[in-house]
Amino acid sequence: MTSRPAPARRFLDLAVAQMGPVHLADSRPSVVARLVAMLREAHGRGARFVVFPELALTTFFPRYWMPEAEAQERFFERSLPGPQTQPLFDEARRLGVGFYLGYAELTAEGRGFNSAVIVGQDGAIRGHYRKIHLPGHADHKPEAPFQHLEKKFFEVGDLGFRAFDTDGVRMGMCLCNDRRWPETYRVMALQGAEVVVLGYNTPSVNIHWDEPAHLRTTTHLISLQANAYQNGIWVAAAAKCGTEDGHHMIGSSVIVAPSGEIVARTTSEEDEVICVRADLSLGEHFREHVFNFAKHRRPEHYRLIVERTGAGNPLP
Amino acid sequence: MTSRPAPARRFLDLAVAQMGPVHLADSRPSVVARLVAMLREAHGRGARFVVFPELALTTFFPRYWMPEAEAQERFFERSLPGPQTQPLFDEARRLGVGFYLGYAELTAEGRGFNSAVIVGQDGAIRGHYRKIHLPGHADHKPEAPFQHLEKKFFEVGDLGFRAFDTDGVRMGMCLCNDRRWPETYRVMALQGAEVVVLGYNTPSVNIHWDEPAHLRTTTHLISLQANAYQNGIWVAAAAKCGTEDGHHMIGSSVIVAPSGEIVARTTSEEDEVICVRADLSLGEHFREHVFNFAKHRRPEHYRLIVERTGAGNPLP
């Protein structure tokens, strides 16, 4: 082994707070109370940052066909924090614990986004993200067992994939389907992200083709593992899972090390907190050697990634 | 489930021919005889395409410090096929079996590349690739247990990542370390590649830092699995492995389905053939739905991938 000084070790006490189902009948205050309870549990176990799911405040409403106006009235946040979510922000500041939260965002102009924020240990918003890789469809599919209407209720995010400095850590974020696209992680790693956090709602049934059910979890995990490794970053992913009003979603919330190894994983499909002491310097080994981007990347050969959207013919 | 016609099924009978060690003292004809024997075995088991390793004709010579001229004389091919490799091409044509082969290429101008070819069932070369992501170093590291001198002996490939049509299949290829870079697969998938083939020589010891030994196999596998899935392609990877003159390399040659699942894997560190009947239409499910690039990709948010080489500051 080449003798060289090891990078100084820095740690992030990181938790994932998976959520069990949020039913249509569940009130917003009852959901926020669950989030606050998990924030406290994570803090009690030493965490300084907690990752909550995508659309954490409501049921996964894109499964229901309804007019936009109705969805916006019932499921979207006009401000964050707002009157009903303020207790979560207050508790974060009181405990000195940052968090990531996914929610449906309604702008003053009436635009809808599937969004997330990173909140610092002082309770202030440090980063804002609007989901870019919207899955599903915009039309009504009455023959399907349920809908996946993200392309109806949300616009494509317009804030890009960005890294944010929060409490001494450079953190990126994304949402659900973004985690299956390697571009997501790479763009944030190219901004020096050390940790990428995300929430997801992943139905156990693929409405588009007869995908074997076990693949829903397999593909979730390998996507997180390979992209953590290939960028030398920690990845923490929080599910909303279990059966929401008869609709089952996968669990398997995980924290993945820059080695690509799953180092913490939920065992239930209910509210459940998992924690690790994440060694941020571990990623530096990968980023200094096999994934020393400056030394090894060859962007002149990657141009098709931005020059084409869909697949085309072989290069001449 | 939405009722829709399944894509017509197309199959590729695909084999990986892993190689045990090639020692410094092994002659080129003895190595070619091993390749021919595995080509025949694969053919006898129904294969129509066989994937051989990187630098299949020689030991992994970048582990040794020596002058370029000496390396070129001993280990590089001035033509392919050449007098010593012609028997492999002849046997491929006789059997009607295509193959991928990695070799050290010396051009007429004296330039060295770590290269590979795809050869059709008629024994003619259909595609040519020169390795882009060269790992290791160019300087002598006498304190290391061995060298990794790919940056000394080879120039960065100048042919790009391309897909080639061969015997009715659109195939891409890469070499070893390329398999850890998601850009590799994406650029070929954007050209409609259905299968990506590659060979590798991966030392069991990382000379750059004290990487836990088991990670060498873990990271190899998750890279192949996630990139197969994220592009909806088959990936076939052939190791040269076992102990070459005291230097151990990992095995675990695999064939990975577009689901990200390992569907065939070697169990030895010797010459070993594995085969699958690869259903090419399986990838179409992924490419039509979750990875429908035309519908879901957002290149306007990927620009950093080509605008930066190394990592920099967060976007403003």
Image (cartoon, coloured by chain):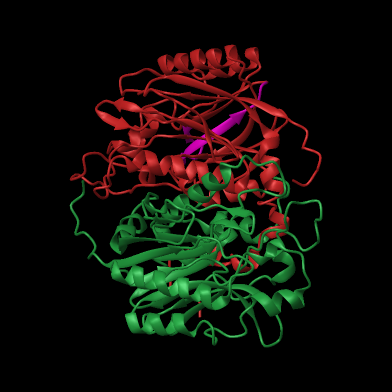
Chain colours: A red, B green
Position of A135 relative to B175 (above/below): above
Which sits in the foreground, A78 or B280? B280
Residue A99 drawn above or below residue B155:
above
| Residue B121 visible in image | yes
Compared across the picture, whether A7 is left or right of B300 comes to right
Residue at (23% x, 47% y) in the render: A141
SS majority, magenta: strand
Q: Residue furthest front?
A: B25
Determine whether, in the image, residue A88 is placed left or right of residue B205.
left
Determine whether B216 is above or below B153 in the image. Answer: above
Q: Hey, which quadrant is residue A240 in on the image? A: top left
Seen in the picture, residue A196 relative to A294 is either above or below; the reply is above
Indicate the position of residue B83 as horizontal and vertical percent values.
Answer: 54, 87
Q: In the image, residue A245 lies at what x, y percent? A: 26, 25
Residue occupying image coordinates x 28% and y 36%:
A64
Which segment did they paint magenta?
A103-121
Please provide percent x and percent y for residue B266: 42, 54
Seen at 63% across and 64% down, the residue is B60
Q: Is residue A115 magenta?
A: yes
Q: Is residue A193 left or right of residue A79?
A: right
Foreground residue among A56 and B221 = B221
Residue A159 seen in this snapshot = no
Magenta region includes residue A300: no
Q: Quadrant location of residue B115?
A: bottom right
